[in-house]
Image (cartoon, rainbow, N blue to C red):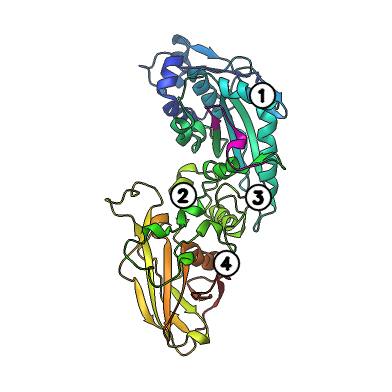
Amino acid sequence: MRDKTVSILSAVLLSVLSFAVIELGAYLGYRSAMADEIVMPADPSISLRAALSNSVLAAIPVLVYHEPDSEVIAGLRTYGQEQPLTEAELNGLVVFLNLDPLPMEEDAYYITFLASATAYRDFLQDYGESLQSFLLRHVAWMDREIRFADPPVAGGLVARRLIVIEDGIWNSDSEERGIDYRAHGLTDSDGSWSFIDSYCPSCAFYSPDLGLDFGLMHEWIHAIFKLPDHYALDFHFQLDINGVLAGVVPESWQFYSAGGRPDISNRDFAMGGNGTVLRHYSALQLAERRVLGIVHDKERALADFGFFGQVPAEVVWDLGLDLADAPILVYRSQPCPPDNPNSAAYACKVLGPVPIFHGRLDERGRIGVGNLFADYEGAVIQKEGVLFVRALVGDEYRFRWLDIRDFTLAIWEGFGESVVMRFNLASADTNPEDFVWTVSYESLDP
């Protein structure tokens, strides 16, 4: 336990105004360099600013707050292991920890864990391993993978603590989950992950060989790193309601597996539950956050929680000499119409009935398309981030899928505002699993 104490508002007031108190504590600038006992007024009618006066402080009754007991279990600092924290005690601990937050490196990410008393107890009982040990094995895997990514997250992933809380503060994981994205107000963590319901690691994307739940690490990609689901860019053939694909491409090409693309997403933590590494696109997205200086700015990171809309202003496609003089059409996805049964799904998309671009390739198989996402600022939502490209060569259609990531990579790879994108188109007898999806980039000659 830390040897300093802090006086706080009553437990009831803290439970109601927890986030306001967190902000006030940061504003007032209390730090560990102050006296061992830090006081705040118990009478909420008295201005906290006025309470800074020693004469006022002396006249106000205060409640002395002591940091809850904690111990290091299996290498992880744990609060509430013997006496789970009440909601007021949790709020008080958040305020206390924020008064003297642990340092954060700019090139590292930090996580705090929470577990209900039942989830904490049941895990040890059901699996014969402490929750702390289980979580730190997952942190170690993810830490290694992001440190060896291209480009690397040199500081890796750091586990701060586990807080065991009373049952009933939240009724379910889903009710609480959004709070994890803001780390329950903790300023020394980029996100948190909470186990309110009893946790079943083997119920989804569990590797028995490694003893790891990769579905859990996929969820950390959102809560800690604020990266999007790559599978949210998938296109499902049932939603070709405008007939863009039917009769043009075989059924095998009417589904677009953005999350399974071998050149960008396959095996990435963000692809879905089976991801085991941090691949180049995701690593570049984190590097862009470092450039912007928003790694630990949760609100800024959440505002960009999607697919960056960074696209060169001048884009030329090079499809090869065998497509010289071919007419080309480009369709873009858009949200499902309100009357569609799946319209409420966050990734429900259809292809717009009207092409957003049409033209004819030149004698070299090239065409300038400009910026096909020029009407977007900031992040492009997944419902509008997919393109279907179709060319007619003689009497045969050639086609492929692209998405916003293919364009953003040109910026992140350093090609600036003008670039040549070279890629393949498929034919009717091309197997999507054998198709070379890679898009290559080169500078556009002046």
Name the secondary structure under disc 4: loop
Residue 39 in magenta stretch: no
- The span picked out in magenta is 194-207
Name the secondary structure under disc 1: helix
Mark 3 vs 4, N-terminal side:
3
Disc 2 marks a residue whose amino acid type is Phe
From this view, report whether residue 365 is shown above or below residue 311. below
Q: Tags 4 and 1 in contact by the CB under 8 Å rule?
A: no
Q: Which residue is mark 1?
A: 124
On the question of residue 33 being in view, the answer is no
- 373 or 202, which is in the foreground? 202
Mark 3 vs 1, N-terminal side:
1
Q: CA distance from mark 4 to mark 1?
A: 46 Å
Q: Which residue is mark 2?
A: 305
Which numbered disc, 1 or 2, marks the residue closer to the eye? 1
Mark 4 vs 1, N-terminal side:
1
- 291 or 209, which is in the foreground? 209
Q: Which residue is mark 3?
A: 146
Q: Residues within 10 Å of mark 4 (few under 14, many from 20)?
A: few
Residue drawn at the location 44% of the way across and 20% of the way down: 14
Q: Which residue is mark 4?
A: 413
Disc 3 marks a residue whose amino acid type is Ile
Q: Is residue 49 left or right of residue 196?
A: left
